[in-house]
Image: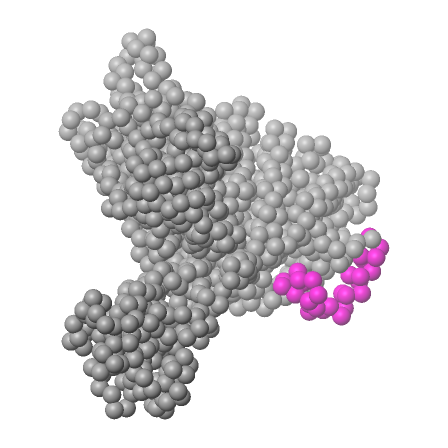
Amino acid sequence: MKRKENSIFDGKILLPALWDAVKKLNPKHLVRNPVIFVTEVGALLTTLQIFRHHVAGESAGYVIQISLWLWGTVIFANFAEAVAEGRGKAQAKTLRNARTKTNATRLDRNGIPTTVSAEELKKGDVVLVTANEVIPADGEIVEGAATVNESAITGESAPVIREAGGDRSAVTGGTTVLSDWLKVRVTAGAGESFLDRMISLVEGAQRRKTPNEIALSILLSGMTLIFMAVILSLRPLGLYGGLFFSITVLVSLCVCLIPTTIGGLLSAIGIAGMDRMLQKNVLAMSGRAIEAAGDVDVLLLDKTGTITLGNRQATEFLPAPGVTPLELADAAQLASLADETPEGRSIVVLAKEFGIRAREIHELPNAKFVPFTAQTRVSGVDWDGRSIRKGASDSIIKFSKGNCPPEVLADVERISRAGGTPLLVADEIRVLGTIQLKDIVKGGLPDRFKRFRAMGIRTIMITGDNPLTAAAIAKEAGVDGFLAQASPEDKLALIRKEQAAGHLVAMTGDGTNDAPALAQADVGVAMNTGTQAAKEAGNLVDLDSNPTKLIEIVEIGKQLLMTRGVLTTFSIANDVSKYFAIIPALLLGAYPEIAPLNIMHLGSPQSAILSAVIFNAIIIVLLIPLALRGVQFRPLGAGAILRRNLLIYGLGGVVSPFVGIKLIDVTIRFLGWA
Amino acid sequence: MNLLGWLQLILFLGVLFLITKPLGIHLYKVLTPGEKPFLGAVFGPIERLFYRLLGIEAKSEQGWLAYTGSMLVFSLVTCLFTYAVLRLQYYLPLNPQKFAGLAPHLAFNTAMSFTTNTNWQSYAGESTCSYFSQMVGLASHNFWSAAVGIAMAAALVRGIARATSKTLGNFWVDLTRVTLYVLLPICVVYALFLVFQGIPQNFQGYTAVTGPDGFAQTIAQGPIASQIAIKMLGTNGGGFLNANAAHPFENPTPLANFIQMISIFSIGSALTYYLGKMVKNQKHGWSVWSAMVILFVAGALVCWWAESHPSHLFGEMGIRAADGNMEGKEVRFGVFNSALFATITTDASCGAVNSMHDSFTPLGGLVPLFNIELGEMIFGGVGAGLYAILIFVVISVFIAGLMVGRTPEYLGKKIEAYDVKMAVLYTLVGAFTILGFTAWGAVSQTAQAGLNNGGPHGLTEILYAFSSGTGNNGSAFAGLTANAPWWDVALGIAMFLGRFWMIIPMMALAGNLVGKKIAPTSVGSFPVSGATFTLLLVGTIVIVGGLTFLPALALGPIVEHFIMTGSAKLY
């Protein structure tokens, strides 16, 4: 189950957002966003002008319109932020429902149970949780195994198994035990649990500006200061020529020139980025982690589970000379019937393709199954007077008393070199042939890696296999490099090496021994099924525990940065046309000769200024969907992306307001507003 | 606009292109420790002797604070020195005309002007300054301020090129080597060439003659050629004579005019090659060069067109307008070479003039003014042009860099909050100074006492003066009697802010960049060469840099143009 995607136009979000947008007019809140703060001050100044006009007995209709649109600009910007937050709030509400008040059964040192409220639990307490009880706090299982429903956190309703020891020993408060019981050592006190952190993250309560957002804010503030200097100097410059520019006009020009579009949408873009991660069921511990994901240029991917399907599978039967494929398939299936490992089951499945129907163990009442032991290193069955075995080549050759045709040995050699695993099948001393076991590379991956290469991202496969096998799989999957026979230390060393060369590294991990590498990586994605240590070390948690998702995480990070970039470019490019709308309007009264500069042929100075102000306000609303959804992501090289975005948002940003302002001018004159 | 003009423009661009690489390589060798530049065998011993005498540790490098601090101390000391020379010139030698010392406000303005490579001249050279003042007080600054500019640019380029380092070079070494290996040798040859073209070089007093038409004249002369060489090469622009490069003794022939124009751009152009060589990406250097050429050619064409198409009013007033607007232009240069010179001198922060910008048509005069307000980064002042355009490269890369989906990166270095802050501060200082002083001038009675024209043209004169001062250009729109206490002091402050208060954030940026590691380039890296980058840079310079001044320009030359065409009124 995927988390439900909230539509941008969901009434449940829009209406409260509108109210929030008004509440956010509080200057204390707005001062954090200098561009919009200046707009608000401007709106206030023009509003005061209304009273001045009123006192002077002049018509204030025009000033009222301008100030309404200026307040509108501020409210639209607030609205964008409120909508983005609203989506997070809706999700937080769902999460909060999971945090119902529960009681916990705390065990003291002697194992004597007492019932306490979950809020009283402290780090280090041990609690007993039985079937149908809610786990009261985050913790590490010290004893027991149970099925747990984690849908409150992951949205996934299928139960998962949690057990003491190993990499699946972490449980999350708010999830429910379905069967059996667990003894859990609490690792986070009330208010610090994973669920609490999740709620505050999606609500945006802990949202801090990311480094890149800060840098962009500085640029926007700087531009705002420059334009304020332009406007402030305009009044004395006008006085020199005997022109008196009213406060309303100057404020209008100022608000049009300062980058209100990006200023108004900036925080919405950031919140929406975290939200998009959450839609993918990835929890970002900070906005910074998402940004870093966009910068990553080296991906470390675990082979098992990420690049290949979980286990090796039988892909081919290679009969010995004089043996029919059917005969080999039949023997291989018999030998694997009792083998419950995924490899064994894949042999049974492959044999079916030869028309051999699946036999059940109970159909062979006299059969004696021989399980795999470390001593013999073969498994098989004694049935119907036959003694069939399968196993690694050296073990089977020993079993068949050295009786093995050279053709079979050649097959074994070839399969090994290609990175596969050969298994031999023998009936008594007669070797029947070879089963080829192979890692199956997940569909579509080579293509995906190719797209990454086009974006300048290298993929490195991490595996415990020997270099020969690793090289073969790496080649098949199309990764750019591999680390074979990798220990956690090797992994850490590789990350450090790449970072020293100036690369930014992303990786996924779940085990406790992954924690140091997760912490070292610039982007560490911990699996939700993983240990507490891994989850603490990573800066993103994948609730679906799907290692392939790293790829999508990188795409979301890039999309976030791109959205910021295109809206900044668009906002700045808009200024060109606004100059052409407002400057003729400023001068037309005193110098009618300047009329040819009014290239848009706007109706009157008043309608020109009002049109520019209206365009400036509604462009924010029009761009909210883009800010929340993000620009379309394409796996292209930087040069191609730059050209594309410059054309659409740079050139488009210069041209589109000419059209927009003209249309608004025609409309408001039609309506008789100015 | 005629064929001869087009051919000269192409010739100019061709020659500029050809000298860029060799001069760039020479600059690289001069500015890179351990490299042996041309003439090293001759000047090497002098260089080392110089270090020993002054106790300079040539091998030790400085961080940005020490580097900038050294420059500030050097500039302060030399500024005070020149102030003293100008005040005391009556008592000093080489003063055949027995000129008195300069008034305090004029001496302040002039000392600041030459220290900051502005060479704004509130004084008239031939009637105010002794030969000693010209040669020791002023020409010395022509060398020093040029060398300082190149050193600052080199420090910024090192900041970009070096990975995880702390130091930007040694200011004293850079200053010495640039003067010794670049400026002095070129100027010796250049001055001799100018003497050959007919420029005087002597220590005689002025000659009194009676001309063929019976009028008595005083012919000013002196050690002119030596001063003109560095005035152009170092983009200083301060003339020996008041009429500057329009005077036949400063700019006698079309060939001298051509070489002077080339020399204004030469070091600025070569520095782009130095940039490419330093960052090991020559294409980047040429892309920056191309952006400069695009802006230069655009300006030159607009100015040339405007001056070739004066209003019909000129003809009606009995001014021959068939060849274009010849008011305030020298007949030996004509419309094209006057328009080209005006564009070049304001693209670079030279400020020498061979025609009166005040007499240009409104749009023709708009071009030099707009060039200065863009920040003089079109080749620009020696060094100052490169660091100015690199600030805009940083801003462009930051805005557009996000669009490729990564934290913005310039040549492998991440552009972060601190870098953006310093780049923005740099542009803020320029805009605030120009607009602030102009606004003051526009409403100040004291300021307007110096104006010779009314209407929008008068406003243009004020705007031009403060743009020129802040931009360290030094050319005057003229029409302004600037030698008055208010103007001298206000412009002196503008020059000071426009030089040092812009250098400090620039150097802070260099100091921050030098400590960063360099991420390896891949197809995912932001491209800093090619047509897209060049156009992006041009667009950012025009939209972010230039449009700031559009409202002010609208009230000056733009409105003047429309009044001229619409109401047939001239100012």
From the viewer's perspective, is B459 left or right of A592? right
Does the magenta segment cover residue B39?
Answer: yes
**Residue in the foreground of this view, choosing between B479 and B104:** B104
Quadrant containing the C terminus of chain B in the rendered view = top left
Residue found at the far right of this picture: B53
The residue at 57%/24% (across/down) is B446
Horizontal and vertical percent position of residue A243: 39, 25
**Residue in the foreground of this view, choosing between B213 and A579:** A579
Horizontal and vertical percent position of residue A71: 31, 24
Asked which quadrant contains residue A45, the reply is top left
Horizontal and vertical percent position of residue B435: 50, 33
Main secondary structure type of the part rendered in magenta: helix
The residue at 45%/43% (across/down) is A142
Q: Is residue B361 above or below residue B335?
A: above
Tell me where the magenta segment starts and ends, as one range: B27-54
Residue B465 in view of the camera: no
Quadrant containing the N terminus of chain B in the rendered view = bottom left
The residue at 29%/51% (across/down) is A632
Q: Is residue A655 above or below residue A513?
A: above
Q: What's the image's color scheme?
A: one colour
Asked which quadrant contains residue A547, the reply is bottom left
Q: How many numbered circles does the render carry?
A: 0
From the viewer's perspective, is B456 left or right of B491? left
Residue found at the far front of this picture: A366
Residue A328 in view of the camera: yes
**Residue in the foreground of this view, choosing between B234 and A593:** B234
The residue at 34%/22% (across/down) is A23
Horizontal and vertical percent position of residue B205: 75, 49
Q: Is residue A296 above or below residue B361?
A: below
Does the magenta segment cover residue B341?
Answer: no
From the viewer's perspective, is A189 left or right of B51? left
